[in-house]
Image (cartoon, rainbow, N blue to C red):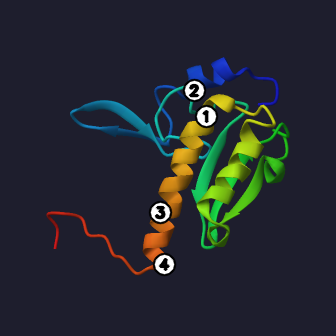
Amino acid sequence: MANVSDDLVWACVNKHNSFLRKQRGNKTMLSAEPGNARNVHSFKYSGLANSKAISVVPTESGAVLLKKTKSKNKPAKLSTKINLKNARGPARNNKTIEAAISKSYYRRDLLKDTLARHSAVAKAASRKANGVEFSVSGRK
């Protein structure tokens, strides 16, 4: 897929792919694909169709910022990983994200979405570290 345009890839995966999450009674389609900043099924946020994709993924030590690289023929080097540790604090990690996105001119339109995703991941990690357990309402 080295010489395929982003629009052609989106035309192929738009209606049917394994990451698509449809809900009955709700027209909003969600996506679980890697590289999707908001988990919304659209061309703007797609990690499969865009040659430049960015996302925040939770890990044991905090989170990882994933940036898609240009080496499409080398799966091991398909993404660059930038560690965002919880011990550093969210403000310092936000500066790292801003430097990786806006200062290097890499998908500046996804900056706010990526920062929001990081804050949600960091909040969930801090709650997990404090021992707060969540329960789904209606189930026992």
Choose mark 2 or mark 3, whichever is in front. Answer: 3
Query: On the image, numbered disc 2 is attached to which residue?
Result: 44
Kind of residue at disc 3: Lys
Element type at mark 3 = helix
- Which circle's residue, 4 or 2, is located before the other in the chain? 2
**Which of the two residues, 61 or 17, is positioned nearer the viewer here?**
61
Label 3 to label 1: alpha-carbon separation: 20 Å
| Residue 121 to residue 70: above or below | below
Picture coordinates of residue 71, whole percent (x, y): 85, 40
Q: Check the image and name the residue furthest to the bottom.
A: 131
Picture coordinates of residue 55, whole percent (x, y): 62, 46
- Which circle's residue, 2 or 3, is located before the other in the chain? 2
- Which circle's residue, 3 or 1, is located before the other in the chain? 1
Choose mark 2 or mark 1, whichever is in front. Answer: 1
Label 2 to label 1: alpha-carbon separation: 9 Å
- Which circle's residue, 3 or 4, is located before the other in the chain? 3
Query: On the image, numbered disc 3 is attached to which residue?
Result: 123
Residue found at x 68% / y 53%: 65
Label 4 to label 2: alpha-carbon separation: 34 Å
Query: On the image, numbered disc 1 is attached to which residue?
Result: 110
Disc 3 to disc 1: CB gap under 8 Å: no
Query: On the image, numbered disc 4 is attached to which residue?
Result: 129
Kind of residue at disc 1: Leu
